[in-house]
Structure formats: structure tokens, C-alpha cells
Amino acid sequence: MSKLTIVANITAKADKIELVKSELLKLIPITRAEQGCVNYDLHQDNENPAHFMFFENWENRELWLAHMEGQHLKDYLAATDGAVEEFVVNEMTAVG
């Protein structure tokens, strides 16, 4: 199976930007240490500070799915409950 790229867009509510950012930052060291994680990079939009984007590469989809079931993501969801306006995940495959 080929490498999987994930683009995850998270938009925080205007009054919850710093909370969401701090919780997203907590995910980075844990996720980077997970089996199958090639890279896990968080970005913040220069024009809209409420918009965050993770650019991730995984060895395969199964290992990414295992990541998605991790306790650290459950903790993130609990900590940011009601603070996120939108969360969109795109599973992508390199074509060129």
C-alpha cells in the first residue's frame, strides 16, 4: 500500500484560537513518535489566525487509522469541545 497524505483543516472559534492552538501543539510530539508517522506538521494561516492545518504523511492508512483512535486525540477532542468551528480531513495520495 502506498504512503497516505493527510491534510486536516481546523478552524477555531474566534474567541478560542489560543486554546485550540495550545491543544494542537500538544499532539505533535506524541504523534511524531507513533509507528508509521513520516511527518506531522502544524501550520497557522497568516491571514486568518483561527485556521490551522496539519500536513501529515503516514506509511499507510492502517497506521493513520490507529493514530486516529489514540488517547491523545480523544483528550484533544475533549479539551476543545465547543471551541472548533470546523474540522475537515482530506485523505490524499501523491500522483506526481
Image: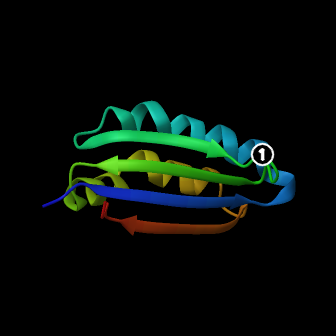
**The quarter of the displayed image where residue 91 is located:** bottom left
Please state if 13 lies on the left or on the right of 34 as rendered: right
Residue placed furthest toward the front = 96
Q: Position of residue 34 (x, y in %)?
A: 29, 38
> Does 53 appear above or below 24?
below
Quarter occupied by the C terminus = bottom left
> Does 50 appear above or below 90?
above
Residue at 23 percent of width and 53 percent of height: 63
Residue at 59 percent of width and 52 percent of height: 53
Q: Position of residue 23 (x, y in %)?
A: 62, 42
Please state if 38 lies on the left or on the right of 29 as rendered: left
Quarter occupied by the N terminus = bottom left
Q: Secondary structure at mark 1?
A: loop
Q: Position of residue 16 (x, y in %)?
A: 80, 52
Residue at 54 percent of width and 35 percent of height: 26
Residue at 62 percent of width and 50 percent of height: 79
Q: Nearer the viewer, residue 18 or 55?
A: 55
**The quarter of the displayed image where residue 62 is located:** bottom left
The residue where tag 1 is placed is 46
Image color mode: rainbow
Residue placed furthest toward the left = 1
| Residue type at the position of mark 1 | Asn
Q: Nearer the viewer, residue 10 or 19?
A: 10
Q: Nearer the viewer, residue 33 or 19?
A: 33
Q: How crowded is the residue under tag 1: few (<14 C-alpha within 10 Å), some, or many (20+)?
A: few
Please state if 45 lies on the left or on the right of 54 as rendered: right
> Does 24 appear above or below 11?
above
